[in-house]
Image (spheres, helix red, strand yellow):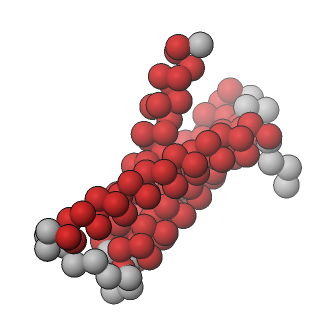
């Protein structure tokens, strides 16, 4: 299995944003716990790690299959991307649900990092438009 260099580069970019936004989220949870809005415990960072891993893994899988689809015929490429999207969505939904149900993870810190790659992609587009 040969992984395209662009897939690795973009996954590193998204992973760095997920890390930065995860640290920001942890800071917000710490501030909220200082005001007794939430109770800080081990479930918050563990949920964040789990959610971040899901988000990065999902992005990597998406980039990997899109890169593989580029070498296919248009019809086959569309079918491959669509199948990948469906499988990733179901897998992500199931894994996030499992994480949300386990008592060792905070539900919010499992789910919130799943939107971090979208934020990273949006910021990447803004950065590329300025060039």
Q: Quadrant of the N terminus?
A: bottom right
**Image position of 1 (left or right of 15):** right
Query: x, y (%) of residue 5?
Result: 80, 40
Q: Which residue sits at x=24%, y=63%?
A: 31
Front residue (pair 64, 73):
64
Q: How many marks?
A: 0
Whether residue 50 is situated above or below residue 65 in the rendered picture: below
Q: Quadrant of residue 53?
A: bottom right
Q: Is residue 9 visible?
A: yes
**Image position of 21 (left or right of 34):** right
Q: Quadrant of the C terminus?
A: top right
Front residue (pair 41, 87):
41
Front residue (pair 119, 85):
119
Query: x, y (%) of residue 7?
Result: 71, 42
Q: Which residue sits at x=48%, y=70%?
A: 50
Q: Which residue sits at x=29%, y=67%?
A: 30
Q: Is residue 94 visible?
A: no
Query: x, y (%) of residue 39?
Result: 22, 78
The furthest residue to the right = 2
**Image position of 116 (left or right of 70):** left
The furthest residue to the bottom = 103
Q: Quadrant of residue 35?
A: bottom left
Whether residue 81 is situated above or below residue 115 in the rendered picture: above
Q: Which residue sits at x=64%, y=46%?
A: 11
The furthest residue to the front = 34
């Amino acid at each position: 299995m040969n992984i395209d260099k662009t897939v690795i580069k973009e996954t590193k970019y998204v992973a760095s944003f997920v890390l930065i936004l995860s640290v920001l989220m942890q800071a917000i949870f710490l501030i909220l716990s200082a005001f007794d809005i939430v109770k800080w415990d081990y479930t918050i960072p563990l949920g964040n790690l789990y959610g971040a891993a899901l988000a990065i893994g999902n992005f990597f899988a998406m980039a990997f299959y899109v890169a593989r689809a580029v070498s296919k015929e248009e019809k086959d490429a569309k079918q491959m991307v669509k199948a990948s999207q469906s499988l990733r969505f179901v897998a992500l939904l199931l894994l996030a649900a499992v994480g949300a149900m386990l008592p060792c993870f905070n539900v919010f810190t499992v789910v919130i990092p799943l939107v971090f790659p979208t934020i990273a992609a949006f910021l990447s587009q803004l950065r590329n438009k300025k060039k």
